[in-house]
């Protein structure tokens, strides 16, 4: 027999709030990204698609430079109080496209 987990009855009032917060935060994030992309002019986008240097610079920075900087940061900071979970988080953020640093 499989056992299922049930939330305690005291948290049932907070579960609707968690769902509502998740829906609202997702909707606001969508509106933010959509609003930013709506300001891009199609002619400028076409120019950038044909700009080989810009594409090469972006791809190499995202997939080579950022992960390398993250790895070097972990190596430099591991003896200065950087815990394993913090190091793993830093590696994930710097190595994943679409991470928080990719938009800066």
Image: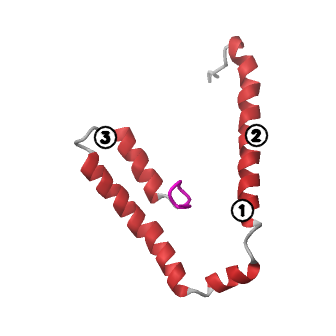
Q: Which one is in front, 66 or 8? A: 66
Q: Which residue is mark 1?
A: 36
Q: Position of residue 102 (x, y in %)?
A: 52, 61
Quadrant assignment, res 67: bottom left
Q: For the residues carrying marks 1 and 2, which lies nearer the camera in this image?
A: 1
Horizontal side, residue 85 vs residue 14: left or right: left
C-alpha span from label 2 to label 3: 34 Å
Residue at screen point 76% across, 40% down: 24
Q: Position of residue 73 (x, y in %)?
A: 31, 53
Q: Magenta part mainly helix, strand or loop?
A: loop
For the residues labelled 3 and 1, the Cα–Cα distance comes to 35 Å
Quarter of the picture holding the N terminus: top right
From the viewer's perspective, is the residue at label 3 or at label 1 nearer? 1
Q: Tag 2 or tag 1, which sits nearer the N-term?
A: 2
Q: Which residue is mark 3?
A: 82
Helix, strand or loop under label 3? loop
- The reply to whether the C-beta atoms of the residues labelled 2 and 3 are less than 8 Å apart is no
Which stretch is magenta? 98-104
Residue 92, position as x, y percentages in the image: 45, 52
Count neighbours of disc 2 (C-alpha within 10 A) and say few if under 14, some if 14 to 19, many if 20 or more: few
- The kind of secondary structure element at disc 2 is helix
Instruction: Compare marks 3 and 1 and give the one earlier in the sequence.
Output: 1
Q: Is residue 43 highlighted in magenta?
A: no
Q: Quadrant of residue 85?
A: top left
Which quadrant of the figure has residue 9? top right
Task: Please tell me which residue lies in front, 70 or 43.
Answer: 43
Label 3, residues with CA under 10 Å away: few <14, some 14-19, many ≥20: some
- Which residue does the numbered mark 2 point to in the structure image? 23
Q: Is residue 79 left or right of residue 44?
A: left
């Amino acid at each position: 027999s499989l056992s299922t987990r049930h939330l305690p009855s005291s948290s049932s009032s907070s579960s609707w709030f968690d769902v509502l917060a998740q829906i609202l935060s997702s909707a606001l994030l969508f509106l933010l990204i959509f609003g930013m992309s709506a300001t891009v002019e199609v002619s400028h986008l076409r120019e950038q698609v044909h700009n080989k240097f810009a594409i090469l610079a972006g791809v190499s920075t995202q997939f080579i430079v950022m992960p390398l900087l993250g790895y070097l940061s972990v190596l430099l900071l591991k003896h200065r109080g950087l815990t394993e979970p913090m190091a793993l988080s830093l590696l994930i953020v710097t190595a994943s496209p679409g991470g928080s640093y990719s938009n800066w």
